[in-house]
Image: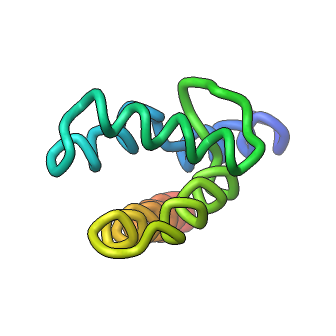
Amino acid sequence: MCNFLKREKWCKMLEIQKSDIIGAYALNVGVAAAKELIEGKISEANLEDKESYTRVETARICGELMREGSLIKIVAQNLLAQLEQRKVSRHRKITY
């Protein structure tokens, strides 16, 4: 497999689904409120509405969420930590 295809596959593995972000908040505020919150923050981050987001895009969304404070901020920080852990885990699998 050429380097371009490996890089493409690696980038796809680091994407997070919009539904996963919404799901993280749905546990606390309900599905409808979580969807409205996330779609608003996607817009505030100047991103297009799509099904999955790269690590950088997810960080931008979480940055907007963290401006809210309280529980919303804590969940956003948790999402970023999970994404970083996923990156480290995938990197270990590829290098070993």
At 56% from the left edge and 32% from the top edge, which residue is drawn? 52
Is residue 36 rendered to the left or right of residue 27?
right
At 41% from the left edge and 74% from the top edge, which residue is drawn? 69
Is residue 95 rendered to the left or right of residue 8?
left
The quadrant of the image that shows the N terminus is top right
Q: Is residue 96 visible?
A: no
- 75 or 79: nearer the eye? 75
Q: Position of residue 42 (x, y in %)?
A: 61, 42
At 76% from the left edge and 34% from the top edge, which residue is drawn? 5
Q: Quadrant of residue 26?
A: top left
Q: Position of residue 87 (x, y in %)?
A: 51, 63
Q: How is the image coloured?
A: rainbow
Q: Position of residue 57 (x, y in %)?
A: 67, 51
Q: Is residue 42 visible?
A: yes
Q: Position of residue 82 (x, y in %)?
A: 37, 64
Is residue 23 rendered to the left or right of residue 62?
left
Above/below status of 81 relative to 3? below
How many marks overall? 0
At 28% from the left edge and 48% from the top edge, which residue is drawn? 25
- 30 or 61: nearer the eye? 30
Above/below status of 52 relative to 96? above
Is residue 45 rendered to the left or right of residue 22?
right
Q: Quadrant of residue 94?
A: bottom right
